[in-house]
Amino acid sequence: MEQTSTVSADAGQRSVTSGRCNQWRSLTGFWLLGLCNNFAYVVMLSAAHDILKKQESENATASTTAMDFQGGNSSNSSRYDCNPVSTGAVLLADILPTLIIKLFAPFVIHKVPYGIRVLVCVTMAATSFLLVSFSSAVWMSILGVIFASISAGLGELSFLALTVFFTSNVLGGWSSGTGGAGVGGAFLYSGLTQAGLSPQITLLIMLVVPLVMLISYFFLLVPPPSLPQWRRMETGYAPVGSEERRQLIDGSEEEEQEKSTSGHVLFPLNVTENRTTGPLTFTEKLHVIKGLLKFVFPLALVYFAEYFINQGLMELLYFPNFFLSHAEQYRWYQTLYQVGVFVSRSSLCCVKIRKLWALSWLQVVNAVLLLFAVRYQFMPSVWLVFVIVIYEGLLGGAAYVNTFYFISEETEDRHREFAMAAASVGDSLGIAVAGLIAFPVHTYFCSL
């Protein structure tokens, strides 16, 4: 009897150890997936100034009769040392495909297993690096940026939805990884080009990133049996009775008690009172989207304000008497912004912010301040702009991670996978509007 008890205890200990190991593997896997998914997107924005400058120089050399926006040196008579084409052009190419995917894919993407989605993301990301690296015209560079956007958009909505099949801490890992992509991508691009490597060689080196995504998903994650890996599942979500789903639903008793007493239920029970299994109907999905609006609008406003700064104003915040060139200043604005994003997206284990609208309006204040700083040039030093840019990143990252945390907490179990995917449109919507507005702002200031 004693021997049987010892064997049973050993088996239990091995099970606990194995469970912890699987959790750490999944947490690490989601961190790397977040890193790889956003890497190409970040690099394309960091390289925006170089992409346009390179094409402009080649066009000017090839033909002196080209249109005005293609010829000449990037410096012009404007006091802002403008590129002929705004970096907002790269931003739009980087975000519009993502926005289209996030608007429509959540309604049909459940028919595509996750393994196939990941293969598409990896292929698109690798193609984007190759196209931009070897481009010989603006359209080819923009096409490469579009491929990066497709990869990032499909990956984000898929991996956010994927978190519902695992324990709740993987959402923090995913968010931290996306912030790490910002820091890693911007620092690596800025650092390698600052060290003397050409943008072309730098982009080719980054082909390792899609490979890491492939390894992270297929070899590092420990997928639950309920995950639709290679074939479509009829339920569309993890069965409530499965061990993995129980861990996610139960979590800790304190969190469940909080939810039941706080009254924060995102979707009323009568929406699905007669449907507790099977995929969501179109009507149910519309109800879910209606409940998500209170999260999507603040997130969209935050990202509108910060990308209006990043792609509409940053290239105009030029300090000519500084030891960094205009292109170098732009790269480091992007890099320091991503540092702020990484810190705040990794903060979920330390602080949670429910007042998302406060973050939105603080970001709007930043945008207005820097707009006036560009117009009237009252900023005394580039160092002050560096500090503001870090603060901007902190606000944006906090808005992102807290939005998806509270959606995950306040959404009914059966809606959670669709809700996480559908809400991802918020940041892309704000970024797209910012990209559109960046064009007239760029034209106005460069005409002064």
Image (spheres, rainbow, N blue to C red):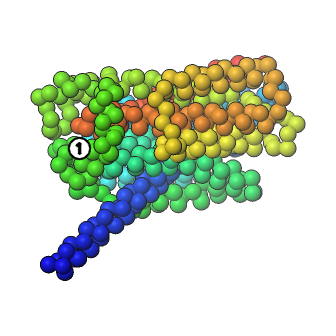
Residue at image x 61%, y 36%? Answer: 393
Q: Secondary structure at mark 1?
A: loop
Tell me the quarter of the image containing the C terminus: top right
Q: Residue at image x 40%, y 49%?
A: 170
119 vs 371, left or right, is: left
Residue 54, x across and y down, in percent? 69, 44
Between 190 and 226, which is closer to the camera in this rendering? 226
Q: Label 1 belongs to which residue?
A: 237
Q: Position of residue 371 (x, y in %)?
A: 70, 21
Residue for point 74% across, 53% down:
194
- Percent x, y for residue 203? 60, 54
For the N terminus, which image quadrant?
bottom left
Q: Where 192 sits versus 363, above or below?
A: below
Kindly identify the amino acid type of the residue bearing the numbered disc 1: Tyr
The residue closer to the viewer here, 427 or 5, is: 5
Left or right: residue 324 compared with residue 86:
right
Residue 118 against residue 410 in the figure, above or below: below
Query: Hey, which quadrant is residue 10 in on the image?
Result: bottom left
**Mark 1 nearby-residue class (10 Å; few <14, some 14–19, many ≥20):** many
Residue at position x 77%, y 33% in the image: 384
Q: Residue furthest right?
A: 321
Residue 423: horizontal and vertical position, in percent?
A: 38, 32
Q: Is residue 1 visible?
A: yes
Residue 441, above or below 103 = above
Asked whether the viewer can see residue 140, the reply is no
Which residue of the protein is positioned furthest toward the bottom in this rendering? 3
Q: How many marks?
A: 1
Residue furthest to the left: 274
Between 147 and 180, the residue placed more toward the observer is 180
